[in-house]
Amino acid sequence: MANLEKRDVWSKLQAAGGVLTAVSVALLGFLGSVYLNRKQESDTRARVYAELTSQREQAESVLRKDMFRSIFESFLQTPTPSIDIKVLNMELLTYNFHESLNLKPLFSHLQRQIDLSKEESAKNYSERLKKVASDVTHKQMLVLEEDGQKFDTTVDLKKLREHPQDVTPESRSLRLEDIERTFRLTPLDVDSKARELKFRLEVTPLPPFDREFNRVEFWVGFYDFPMIDNTRLSHDQRCAVVLKTFEDDRAEVTLVYFPGSRASLKEKPFYEDVISNLQKTPKPGKE
């Protein structure tokens, strides 16, 4: 009798196990089907989004190409357009292509034409050029400062004109991506008419990179944009000097130290910098 009861219990357990197995298989199948359907839907959405984004970028590229050709050709027209039209085209060209073109030569050329002009509105044209340059510099600085470091300094123009040897250099240490460098910025000369300053920049990394050294001299004006006009440093880093204000007796200047990835589209990284960036270990919390 006891054996029969044990067999009945065992039979019931076997039956229950079979039912549980069938339910588990069905549940796994259902969950797997739901997962696959969701993944397929997600992949489809991602593919559609990628296709739409690609088509949008292609359309934008065609539009920008046609816009660039139309604006640039207007400067070469015969007879030449009026200064008002040139300034308008300069504004369109700068606001749309300031990240990919060095526009300083065109700015300087147009500024010279304005200076030689006898039109009553010549001063207004100069202010418009200055405003568009200031707007673009401000936009670029906002981008560079997101991942970069900077310091501000004031140049005594009266002392620079009369006693340039007595002007004190500005020296600061900035740290970016675990690399600390000392920047020594020395004013050398001033061009009041063009509103430009000449600097000597000396960049010295601190240990363990202290064997590297950069020393350059250059002029900086309102038409030098930091994404375009900058000094290339090792480890795919850059620095640029920006002229913010220029008055009779003083000028305000900013030095910005930023990653090479923030530079303009025309500034291609060196091959060894690309390899070094790919081999970097991501920091915790960053993908």
Image: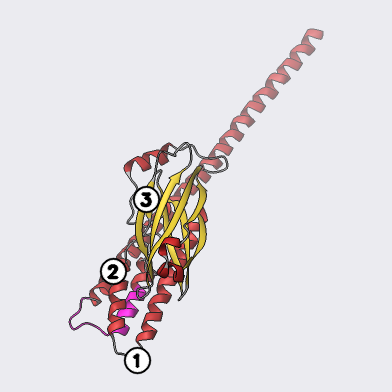
Residue at image coords 56%, 35%: 29
Residue 85: % across, % down: 30, 82
Residue 72 vs 219, above or below: the answer is below
Residue 87 vs 172, above or below: the answer is below
Of residues 56 and 252, the one nearer the viewer is 252
Residue 201: % across, % down: 40, 54
Residue at image coords 44%, 71%: 134
Quadrant of res 223: bottom left
Residue 268: % across, % down: 33, 51
Residue 42: % across, % down: 49, 48
Q: Tag 3: residue type?
A: Arg
Q: How many marks?
A: 3
Density class for disc 2 (Cα within 10 Å; few <14, some 14-19, many ≥20) is few
> SS of the residue at dot 1?
loop
Q: Tag 1: residue type?
A: Glu
**The stretch drawn in magenta includes residue 169:** no
Q: Which residue is mark 2?
A: 105
Q: Which residue is mark 1?
A: 120
Q: Tag 2: residue type?
A: Pro
Mark closer to the chain start, 3 or 2: 2
Q: Which residue is mark 3?
A: 215
Q: What residue span does the magenta drawing correspond to?
A: 76-92
Q: Is residue 148 visible?
A: no
Foreground label between 3 and 1: 3
Mark closer to the chain start, 1 or 2: 2
